[in-house]
Image: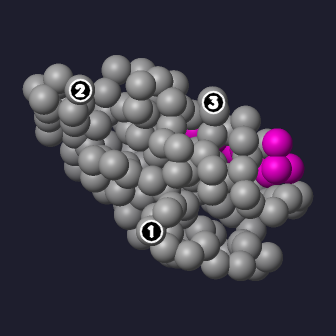
Amino acid sequence: MNALVLYASKTGNTRKVARAIAEAVGAELVEAGKELLPDLSGVGFLFVGDGVYAGRPSRVLVNQLRDLPMLHGTSAAVFGTYGAQAKQLDVLSDLLQAKGARVAGTFACPGKDWFVLGLLKRRHPDEEDLAQARRFAREAWSGA
């Protein structure tokens, strides 16, 4: 089964997690709004990730998800980074489910909090966070 990682990252935190997930399952990596989305007909599993900005995911990823074709028969997992709370995960899950995807799970880890000038969680995502992301990806993908 082919997997694709679609993500948005304004600060680089979520990009680190997206790369770890893509490496763990051998998935293609696509940054929303910066790269063309490939044909999804051959994708059996879709990982979608974003940071959280003022309590929401980025507009670029939300718009890209709304523009996707129906995803009936596609499994998905949602991931992200956060400074205070991972509020974006529910929004992303709801958008995928509205497109007919089955969301198999979610994962979040802290990211450097840019709201307070990077003073909180400044070493995240760290190697342990990335190891957990890889485990999450392998488990979600193998369970689909």
Q: Main secondary structure of the magenta part?
A: strand
- Tell me the SS state at disc 1: loop
Residue positioned 53% across, 44% down in the render:
59
| 24 displayed left or right of 101 | left
Label 3 or label 2, whichever lies nearer to me, is 2
Q: Nearer the viewer, residue 125 or 137?
A: 125
Residue positioned 73% across, 35% down in the render:
94
- Which quadrant of the structure image shows residue 3? bottom right
The CA distance from mark 1 to mark 2 is 24 Å
Q: Where does the image place residue 57, in percent across and percent down from the top left?
A: 51, 37
Q: Residues within 10 Å of mark 3 (few under 14, many from 20)?
A: some
Residue at the spot of label 1: 34
Residue 144 shows up from this direction: no
Q: Earlier in the sequence, mark 1 or mark 3?
A: 1
Q: Amino acid at mark 2?
A: Phe
Q: Earlier in the sequence, mark 1 or mark 2?
A: 1
The CA distance from mark 3 to mark 2 is 21 Å
Q: Amino acid at mark 1?
A: Lys
Give the magenta-colored segment's residue range. 98-107
Q: Are marks 1 and 2 in contact (CB under 8 Å)?
A: no
Q: Amino acid at mark 3?
A: Asp
Residue at the spot of label 2: 115
The CA distance from mark 1 to mark 3 is 24 Å
Q: Where does the image place residue 60, in percent across and percent down from the top left?
A: 52, 51
Q: Where does the image place residue 48, in percent across and percent down from the top left?
A: 57, 52
In the picture, the disc for residue 107 is none
Q: Earlier in the sequence, mark 3 or mark 2?
A: 3
Q: Are marks 3 and 2 in contact (CB under 8 Å)?
A: no
Question: Does 103 appear above or below 53?
Answer: below
Q: Residues within 10 Å of mark 2 (few under 14, many from 20)?
A: few
- Tell me the SS state at disc 2: loop
